[in-house]
Structures are given as structure tokens and as C-alpha cells.
Amino acid sequence: MKTITSRDNAQYKDLLKLAGSSQARRKSGRTLLDGVHLCQSYLQLRGLPEQCIVSESALRKPEVMEIVGQLESRRAHVLGLPDALYNAVSQVEHGVGVMFLIDTPERSVTAPVTVSAVLLDNLQDPGNVGSILRSAAAAGITQVYCSAGTAFCWSPKVLRAAMGAHFVLDIFENVDLAALVSNAQVATLATSGYATSELYDVDLRQPVAWLFGHEGQGVAGDLLSMATHQVVIPHLGQIESLNVAACAAVCFFEQLRQTR
Amino acid sequence: MKTITSRDNAQYKDLLKLAGSSQARRKSGRTLLDGVHLCQSYLQLRGLPEQCIVSESALRKPEVMEIVGQLESRRAHVLGLPDALYNAVSQVEHGVGVMFLIDTPERSVTAPVTVSAVLLDNLQDPGNVGSILRSAAAAGITQVYCSAGTAFCWSPKVLRAAMGAHFVLDIFENVDLAALVSNAQVATLATSGYATSELYDVDLRQPVAWLFGHEGQGVAGDLLSMATHQVVIPHLGQIESLNVAACAAVCFFEQLRQTR
């Protein structure tokens, strides 16, 4: 294990920049996974990280020792930092003291959608995006396409909310959703409060592409009109809308129920 | 409309304290609703606030003018603040400039559960609690019971995430959930990853009390063992859990589907 003890070390300064700036993460194509759960999931599902960063005190915690042991025996890079230096990098309050530095996969769309997928149009909230990735992965959906205005999927907040879903999904970002919808070889379903077909009356036993929109404005009008179906989740109460991540979970698991 | 222009005004200082301290909100039994949507919902569903607070520049916005006009014609208290003073109170970045000061209803449990209800055991995240309130209200559930460890329902973050659901719900806080479950006159259903009955195989056409637990640890063991049923949402993917708010939405809307 290599250790750095000076704040002026160039590698440490790079790390600090990466942790604090979403622009730096996008530009370098790298991100940080913070916490035991994300690191374990990555190891299990994707393999070795570019680097593992541990705090001095975390090295006494069994779950962290196990990860570091595994990495060192496989000759992966492990970097130890004094707690003060580590805490300046970590964005998690009271975190456990272990992070992975990884490359963020960048995928380009090269083929039309032929399997069940999620299309996110201009979703703003990282917590919502993360929750949707997590629900999609749990429901067995493997492809996610995001418009340019959607929250960056590899940001720490999205990663944290998705709890490892990233590592079983193919995530495409900055996608032209209009082109994707018009070329899709599966039905595209957009949820809208103004739709007249109810979710439960739609046959979901075939693969479908689910289209969800901005938290306030919903799916953009032009995209909405291109969707094969517009569906509404029926409501019983006086509150007429759902949080978009709750709405997505209801849709994905209604599809799962129908295909069971 | 009354206006305050000095930071040293006692009423303004009270407001500032209320905005910044959850302890002050709990102690005084009051909270702030921030933004047009929450204020409109409150007016429509609950009536007049104790006070409406507006920023100087918001008075030029039609949606705010409409709210203030309605309040003044009904002789409610409206307080105008210069933008700098208003912004120090508001917790919402780029908010629209209108808030209601309201009393938070405090309800004590006096009767057993006889209708569909939501029981929250030690839920930590205000966004999750708010999303669950919103989904419950949309699914026609009207009663919510929270354990002492659950996020305070009348905090600004929970209010914001619930988008007005509070005003159609009966919310009970600091509830002894074990006593509530043991006296309940409806079946209690707890979700657990270790359960063997699948949600879709349970008959939900009767009222049920849904029990959800802590984001990491789930429902506490003693409560879990008291529940009438333990159910799991079946999964298809490698990711084995859902965010608790996503899980709740799936449960509520499966109940709605079955009772349609």
C-alpha cells in the first residue's frame, strides 16, 4: 500500500479535485465510489478498481480490511491517507473510510432498443435518478438511456442512491431520445397525468421502453407525442401525482407482475 | 400587509429561528411551508395559515399576488419582507418568495387501526418519508403512524418531498408501533427481503396496515415478528433490494390494483 501524507502531493490534489467537481469527473471520465457497499458491489460485479483509497482508521475495520486484503492479493493499487486528508476527499459524513476510484464507462448508442429499457428525459434530482436505476435493476431491466439534461449518472449522489445498480446496467448518457424512440423496436410507454389508458390495462408481457420526464414538467411534449402509449397510474386520493421514482417503481413492478 | 425591515425585529428573529432549527419547530408546534405549490395546497385543503410571509420581489409574481389577494380579502396575516431578509428565512434556493407559517397538528393515538394505514419504523431520510406520504395519499391511504426515530414529518424537507400530501393525511408521530400493531383490527404487512410470500400472492382487497422500516436495517425484529404477514417484492435482477419509498409505492399501488 502506498501512503500520502502531504496535502501538496500532486496525486492527492487530483483526487480532491475529482471529489469536489462534477466537471472534473466528467472531463476525466473517472468517479469515486464511496463506502463499503458500493466498493463490494463493484468488486463483485465489475472487478478491480483503478485505485482503492482508505483512511488510516478504516484499516482497523474488518469489512475494510477484507476489501483491502482482496485488492492487495490481486496487486491492485491501494492508497492510504491520514484521516484528515481522507475526510477532505470523502463526500459522505461519518463514512466508513473506503473509496474506489473507477473509470466511468462511456457508451454510445449504436443499435435500436430491442429489450426493456428506461429512458430519462431531463430528470433533475440525483436521488430520483439513483432510485430509478436501482428499481430498474431489481426488476431485471438492463438498459438506461438519459437525455443531455438528466443528472449525470456517475455523480456521487446518483451512485449512492442506486446502491450498486450501475454495475449491472448499461447506461447511455447524452442520448438523443427522440431518435431513440423513433427507431425503437419495442413499444415506448410514457407516463402522463393526462393519459386516458390506465397502466393496469396495458399488456406489458412484451419488452417495453419506459419514458419518464422532468420532476415538474413531465416528459417533453414532442417526445410524449412520439410514444406508442401514454399511460396513467390511477389514483384514489386527492393527491394527483407521484414522485417520478415512485411512479417508475410502480411501472417496472407491474411489468414484472404481468410477466411472472 | 405588515412589513418588517429590521433584522432586529423580535418577530423576524423568531421566524429566523423557526426556519433554522428543527428543535424550535418541534418545541413551538409550528412550521414553514415554502413555495407556491405547498401554500396553494394548504389554502385549498386546510384553510388559512397563521401567517403568510412574502418577499418584496415576489409581490410582482401573479401566482403570489393571487395567494396574497385571497388572504388579505379573508383578513389573514400577511407579512412582507425585503428580499435579503426573506432569503435568510427561506431554505429553498431560487424559491419563489412565499411561505406560510402554520401550526403543526399533533395527534395522539386513541383508537386501534381499522382502515388502511402506513406505519414507519425508524425511517431516516426526509426525502423517503415525504415520498411515502405522497404515494400513500395518491393511493387513497389516509393514516400514517411514525415511530419516535422516524424523520419529523413537518420538517421542510419532508414537506417539500410530500408536495401537499400532509394536508389530506392524518399523521401520528412518536407512536408506540408495537402497541399499535398488537391492537390493530386490520392485517399488518411488513416487507422484508427474507420473507417467503410474494406481494402479488397476498389478498389485498381488505384494508391493511403497511409496515416499513429503517433504510439500512429494515423493520426491527420484534415488530417484524408481530406482523400478520411478511411479504417480499419479487426481483428479477441481481440487485436485491429497492429503495424503501419505491418499495412502498409498489405495495400501495398493488393494493389499489387489487381493489379497483
Image (cartoon, coloured by chain):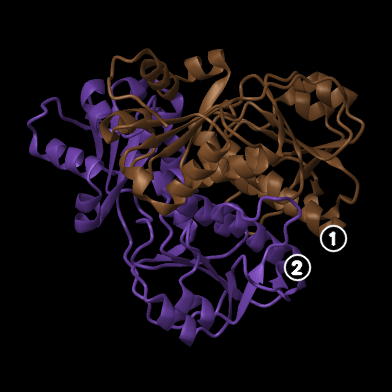
Chain colours: A purple, B brown
User: Three-letter amino acid code at disc 1?
Assistant: Arg
Question: Do labels 1 and 2 touch, CB within 8 Å?
Answer: yes
Please give the name of the residue rendered at 80% of the width and 52% of the height, measured from the top-left corner. B255
Please give the name of the residue rendered at 76% of the width and 48% of the height, measured from the top-left corner. B140
When the figure is inspected, residue B13 is found, relative to residue B252, above or below; the finding is above
When the figure is inspected, residue A12 is found, relative to residue B151, above or below; the finding is below
Q: Which residue is mark 2?
A: A200
User: Three-letter amino acid code at disc 2?
Assistant: Tyr
Label 1 element class: loop
Quarter of the rendering occupied by the C terminus of chain A: bottom right
Residue B256 in the image: x percent, y percent? 79, 55
Residue B22 in the image: x percent, y percent? 48, 20
Q: Residues within 10 Å of mark 2 (few under 14, many from 20)?
A: some
When the figure is inspected, residue B153 is found, relative to residue A49, above or below; the finding is above
**Chain letter of the residue beneath label 2 in the structure image:** A
Are tags 1 and 2 found on a single chain?
Answer: no
Q: Which residue is mark 1?
A: B260
Can residue A74 be spotted in the picture?
no
Closer to the camera in the image, B143 or B96: B96
